[in-house]
Amino acid sequence: MAPHPEGGRFRQIWTSEQRVAPLDGRSARTAGTAIQYLLDPGEEARWHRVDSDELWVWQDGGPARLLTASAPPGTPGHRPDAHQLGPPGPSGNGSRTPNAGEGMHCLVPAGTWQSTHLLSRTYALFLCVVAPGFDTRDYTLL
């Protein structure tokens, strides 16, 4: 895996062969992309935004908190919402189900500020799918 500019490491695993022209006026791009994204203890995803929808899917490791906000940090409108992603916990019948407040996935709408950090002393591995596909021109990193 390669270092990611926002922190952690990533590996590109899919780029659609289809091209689309987003309705918001951005130039044509691939219809979708996907990466595996890894955070190790002591790492976090710095605040950033992507101008396409991004679906985070927890795959392995410990729990993490994905923060989302409509305004960037340090501005009056910055009021982050917390979304916990992580492993299923035991239910009363012995099966594995998400604990209260936890989930296996979270959709971050286009243009939403986001940051992710670990909630335990273990790694977390995610699948991140972006549609329309990720393009560096649509990426803002603080």
Image (cartoon, grey):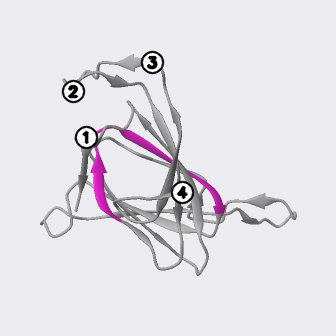
State yes or no: residue 26 in magenta: no
Name the residue that disc number 3 marks: 18
Taking the image as shown, residue 3 lies to the left or right of residue 27, namely right
Where does the image place residue 92, in percent across and percent down from the top left?
Answer: 83, 67
Other residues around mark 4 within 10 Å, as few (<14) / some (14–19) / many (≥20): few
Name the residue that disc number 2 marks: 26
- Counting residues from the start of the chain, the first of labels 2 and 1 encountered is 2
Marks 2 and 4 in Cβ contact (< 8 Å): no
Measured Cα–Cα span from mark 4 to mark 3: 25 Å
Q: Secondary structure at mark 2?
A: loop
Q: Secondary structure at mark 3?
A: loop
Taking the image as shown, residue 100 lies to the left or right of residue 114, namely right
Marks 2 and 1 in Cβ contact (< 8 Å): yes
The vertical placement of 131 against 10, above or below, is above
- Counting residues from the start of the chain, the first of labels 2 and 4 encountered is 4
Taking the image as shown, residue 120 lies to the left or right of residue 89, namely left
The boundaries of the magenta stretch are 46-60
- Counting residues from the start of the chain, the first of labels 4 and 3 encountered is 4
Other residues around mark 2 within 10 Å, as few (<14) / some (14–19) / many (≥20): few
Name the residue that disc number 1 marks: 138
- Counting residues from the start of the chain, the first of labels 2 and 3 encountered is 3
Name the residue that disc number 4 marks: 1
Secondary structure that dominates the magenta span: strand
Q: Residue farthest to the left?
A: 76
